Image (cartoon, rainbow, N blue to C red):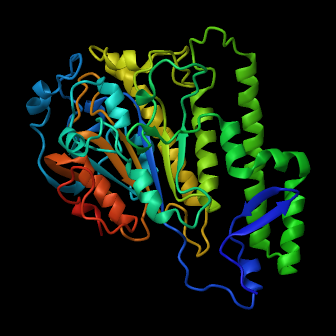
């Protein structure tokens, strides 16, 4: 008998996908050999830019930026770029990147990436909505497309690598506000095409339900672990010790997610949402819950391409950053008050977001694939923003970190400083080719970032 890489358990309409079990595979007379795990791509987006001087190497003592209204960042471009010396350097973690210290051999910092801007849309809205489309104003006009929306990178890649998964792509948001405060352009980075949103899921319960068909699952299966073990025994006669541990950890993860969802739902239920002012969910708990659901989807082969939006652009409302501030704060407002010690308070949010990225990378290292490699070994995980600095609204020097091994295609532990003016669409083209697409251009790209390859 031959079985696929993925195992499915069924109970009265519910479907649960198992992690790879060596003892089950070993019990089969004819099983696939030499099959690599699928390659995965995760693109993590943070809003409102970063405190530039604390993120970019060599700028810690740089001049603090003043607020630049609208989009007038070009007037600061020459001043900000004076330190740009293209090349490859050893990775030295800046103060904002310190949470990544345990991953220093697994990441590469890339700077010098720019994106084309077009007047006529709010700078924050275009920063998010055009982040993964990189459609230039000229291209949009030539194609008769209303700038800035084209088909985003994740969808293009999903078309190629998503044929064998349940979902070609998975869009996740950590915008926990109970009411909308801005248009969708501030709150979305994934697009099927011009003005065709690929809606992200912000409710952990809805995300769980979508991934695991949870209604039938909860109604008909009371003890998931017993069900899994019973069905596994019928397949393999004898489940190995390591696989029992794998199953135990796997099912504990799902049970833990159920508990955390219930806890957050209780917080929402007890909140006064008649006049929503603050986000009701603690940021760290919420982001990590959404991240764990995403990682389960990757581990179980439900999808191979994910976008993960940490928060919406601008959105002038308060957020709870537990363990960081005593009371809710407004992220966007803080980006325009960096003078004096203001930037130090704002940097706390940047570090908080970096901690969430570190959490995702740590979890990916512990998740084992069919060949014994880790999920991170088989993945490319980017972390970036649509603005280079929230105070200046700049579309140049966009911050980007690339993590993961990409199945041996990425050489990590470096700082790549691209020549000023390198288009971020060149990076997107590079990622597309790393994911197996045979394309020579993407949006307004002029080539690839070849230094990223091994």
Towards the viewer: 420 or 307: 307
* Vertical relation: 5 (above or below) 119: below
| Residue 254 image offset from top left, x and y in percent | 74, 50
| Residue 210 image offset from top left, x and y in percent | 68, 46
Q: Residue furthest front?
A: 144
Judged left or right of residue 347, residue 197 is right
| Residue 415 image offset from top left, x and y in percent | 26, 52
Residue 50 visible? The answer is no
Judged left or right of residue 244, residue 210 is left
Q: Quadrant of residue 235?
A: bottom right
Towards the viewer: 424 or 335: 424
Rendered residue at 21%/21% (across/down)? 65
Q: Quadrant of the N terminus?
A: bottom right
Rendered residue at 34%/39% (across/down)? 149
* Vertical relation: 175 (above or below) 4: above
Rendered residue at 35%/22% (across/down)? 344
| Residue 104 image offset from top left, x and y in percent | 39, 53
Q: Quadrant of residue 167?
A: bottom right
Judged left or right of residue 42, residue 25 is right
Residue 227 visible? The answer is yes
């Amino acid at each position: 008998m031959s079985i696929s890489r993925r195992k499915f358990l069924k109970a009265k309409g519910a479907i649960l996908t198992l992690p790879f079990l060596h003892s089950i595979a070993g019990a089969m007379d004819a099983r696939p050999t030499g099959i690599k795990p699928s390659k995965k791509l995760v693109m993590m987006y943070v809003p409102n830019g970063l405190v530039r001087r604390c993120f970019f190497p060599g700028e810690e003592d740089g001049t603090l930026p003043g607020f630049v209204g609208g989009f007038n960042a070009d007037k600061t471009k020459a001043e900000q770029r004076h330190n740009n010396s293209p090349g490859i350097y050893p990775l030295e973690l800046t103060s904002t990147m310190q949470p990544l210290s345990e991953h220093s051999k697994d990441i590469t910092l890339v700077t010098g990436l720019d994106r084309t801007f077009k007047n006529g849309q709010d700078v924050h809205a275009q920063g998010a909505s055009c982040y993964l489309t990189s459609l230039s104003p000229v291209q949009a006009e030539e194609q008769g497309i209303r700038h800035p929306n084209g088909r985003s990178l994740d969808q293009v890649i999903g078309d190629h690598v998503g044929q064998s998964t349940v979902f070609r792509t998975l869009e996740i948001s950590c915008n926990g506000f109970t009411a909308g405060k801005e248009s969708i352009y501030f709150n979305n980075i994934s697009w099927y095409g011009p003005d065709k949103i690929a809606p992200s899921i912000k409710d952990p319960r809805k995300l769980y339900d979508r991934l695991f068909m949870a209604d039938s699952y909860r109604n008909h299966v009371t003890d998931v672990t017993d069900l899994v073990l019973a069905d596994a025994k019928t397949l393999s006669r004898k489940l190995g010790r390591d696989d029992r541990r794998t199953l135990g950890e796997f099912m504990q993860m799902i049970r833990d997610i159920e508990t955390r969802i219930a806890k957050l739902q209780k917080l929402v239920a007890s909140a006064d949402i008649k006049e929503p002012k603050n986000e009701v969910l603690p940021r760290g708990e919420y982001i990590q819950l959404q991240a764990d659901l995403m990682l389960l989807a990757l581990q179980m082969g439900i999808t191979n391409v994910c976008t993960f939006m940490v928060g919406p652009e601008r959105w002038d409302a308060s957020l709870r950053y537990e363990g960081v501030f005593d009371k809710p704060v407004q992220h966007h407002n803080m980006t325009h008050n960096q003078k004096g010690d203001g930037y130090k308070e704002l940097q706390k949010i940047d570090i908080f977001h970096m901690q969430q990225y570190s959490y995702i990378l740590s979890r990916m290292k512990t998740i084992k694939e069919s060949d014994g490699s880790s999920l991170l070994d088989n993945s490319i995980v980017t972390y970036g923003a649509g603005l280079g600095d929230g105070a200046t609204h700049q579309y140049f020097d966009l911050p980007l970190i690339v993590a993961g091994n990409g199945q041996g295609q990425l050489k990590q532990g470096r700082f790549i400083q691209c020549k000023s003016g390198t288009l971020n669409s060149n990076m997107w083209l590079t990622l597309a080719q790393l994911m197996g697409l045979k394309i020579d251009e993407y949006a307004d790209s002029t080539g690839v970032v070849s230094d990223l390859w091994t």
